[in-house]
């Protein structure tokens, strides 16, 4: 138990400090000197390898509301139109959750109609706005599974449902709409943090058993798979358990939605990047922003595309992801 707690603590403070770096350098030097040759193997480039470079597209946090908000529709249509013009087409489009705002079957039908013209294959994960009206019933009907993996071009892809909440509704006798309302409010007075959950952690443990340490891994989650900012639920409580399962893999990238702005982080061996939103931009939290995060221009309220966009990402030969933000604020509209 102590050993596990130690590992968790280490992972949550795992930005490699200069002090640790020097300690590791000294250790590696001494260890290798015993054999007479000094090598700093841990400084060598990753040997992780994808079969060939390729592109995939990302869209997130569309929050389509049906006919009651036409702006969301216009933004999604613009993204679809831009993506369909790409030649060659991306290998797939990952839609990172919060496809709709109120979780209804009607809104999901509306979403499906907007995205029907997409030429490439669409893959989905759920956000909290897709889930808490009917606990995933409409999500499954329209978008399929929430937890799955596949191998493509030498990369192991993992899609997860990271928006599990502890049951805050039964004891309070909340209606489905009230549950959805609380779950979908960032600074909700009830609801608590998101979880991956024991069942899915078990699934991940089994899934990774067949993946070599040198195989690049790309994980899609809705909420950030780390502790970013709890007051707005930019937080996954059991994320450190996921980090532990990923220890030792040479190339790991997590891409998440939910925060509606660009943010980067690195913890241990894992890179984290967010996707832009197609619905609206959230400001950065007042604290908790990881050091080195890029600043994002404030959205211009007169521009319905301000601070929004989507991504066409490039996976290189080492399996690393080059996040290529197609942010509309930076373009003439
Ligand atoms: Fe969202
Ligand atoms: Fe969300």
Image (cartoon, rainbow, N blue to C red):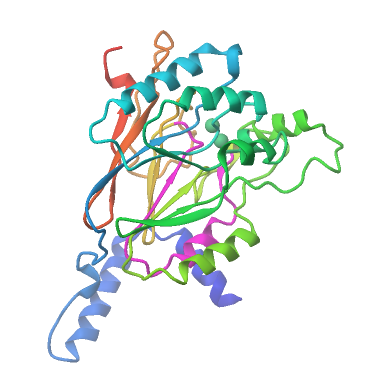
**Residue, x 36% and y 45% (percent of image)?**
291
Q: Position of residue 210 (x, y in %)?
A: 44, 71
Q: In this rendering, would 332 be left or right of 150?
A: left
Task: Please identify the residue farthest to the bottom as the structure is shown.
Answer: 35
Residue 100 seen from this side: yes
In front of the other: 80 or 192: 80
Can residue 246 be found in the magenta stretch? yes
Can residue 133 be found in the magenta stretch? no
Image quarter for ligand 2: top right
Q: Position of residue 187 (x, y in %)?
A: 63, 33
Task: Please identify the residue farthest to the left as the structure is shown.
Answer: 37
Residue 63 seen from this side: no
Q: In this rendering, would 186 be left or right of 32?
A: right
Q: Quadrant of the N terminus?
A: bottom right
Q: Quadrant of the C terminus?
A: top left
Q: In this rendering, would 141 be left or right of 78?
A: right
**Residue, x 60% and y 28% (percent of image)?**
108
Q: Position of residue 188 (x, y in %)?
A: 68, 33
* Quarter where residue 308 is shown: top left
Q: Position of residue 294 (x, y in %)?
A: 32, 36
Range shown magenta: 233-260
In front of the other: 163 or 114: 114
């Amino acid at each position: 138990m102590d050993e596990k707690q130690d590992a968790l603590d280490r992972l949550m403070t795992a930005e490699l400090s200069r002090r640790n770096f020097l300690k590791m350098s000294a250790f590696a030097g001494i260890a290798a000197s015993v054999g007479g040759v000094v090598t700093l193997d841990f400084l060598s480039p990753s040997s992780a390898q994808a079969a060939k470079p390729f592109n995939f597209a990302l869209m997130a946090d569309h929050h389509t509301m049906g006919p009651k908000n036409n702006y969301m529709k216009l933004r999604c249509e613009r993204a679809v139109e831009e993506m369909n013009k790409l030649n060659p087409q991306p290998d797939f489009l990952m839609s990172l959750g919060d496809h709709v705002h109120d979780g209804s079957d009607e809104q999901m039908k509306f979403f499906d109609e907007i995205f029907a013209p997409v030429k490439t294959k669409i893959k989905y994960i759920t956000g909290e706005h897709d889930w808490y009206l009917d606990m995933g019933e409409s999500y499954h009907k329209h978008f399929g599974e929430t937890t799955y993996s596949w191998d493509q071009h030498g990369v192991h892809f993992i899609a997860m449902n990271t928006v599990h909440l502890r049951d805050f509704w039964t004891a309070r006798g909340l209606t489905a709409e009230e549950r959805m309302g609380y779950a979908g409010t960032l600074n909700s007075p009830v609801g608590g943090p998101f979880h991956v959950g024991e069942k899915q952690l078990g699934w991940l443990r089994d899934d990774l058993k067949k993946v070599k340490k040198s195989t690049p891994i790309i994980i899609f989650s809705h909420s950030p798979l780390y502790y970013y900012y709890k007051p707005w639920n930019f937080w996954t409580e059991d994320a450190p358990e996921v980090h532990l399962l990923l220890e030792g893999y040479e190339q790991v990238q997590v891409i998440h939605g939910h925060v509606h702005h660009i943010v980067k982080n690195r913890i241990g061996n894992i890179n984290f990047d967010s996707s832009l939103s197609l619905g609206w931009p959230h400001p950065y939290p007042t604290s908790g922003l990881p050091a080195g995060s890029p600043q994002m221009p404030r959205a211009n309220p007169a521009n319905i595309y301000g601070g929004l966009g989507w991504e066409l990402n490039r996976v290189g030969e080492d399996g690393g992801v080059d996040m290529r933000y197609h942010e509309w604020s930076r373009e003439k509209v």
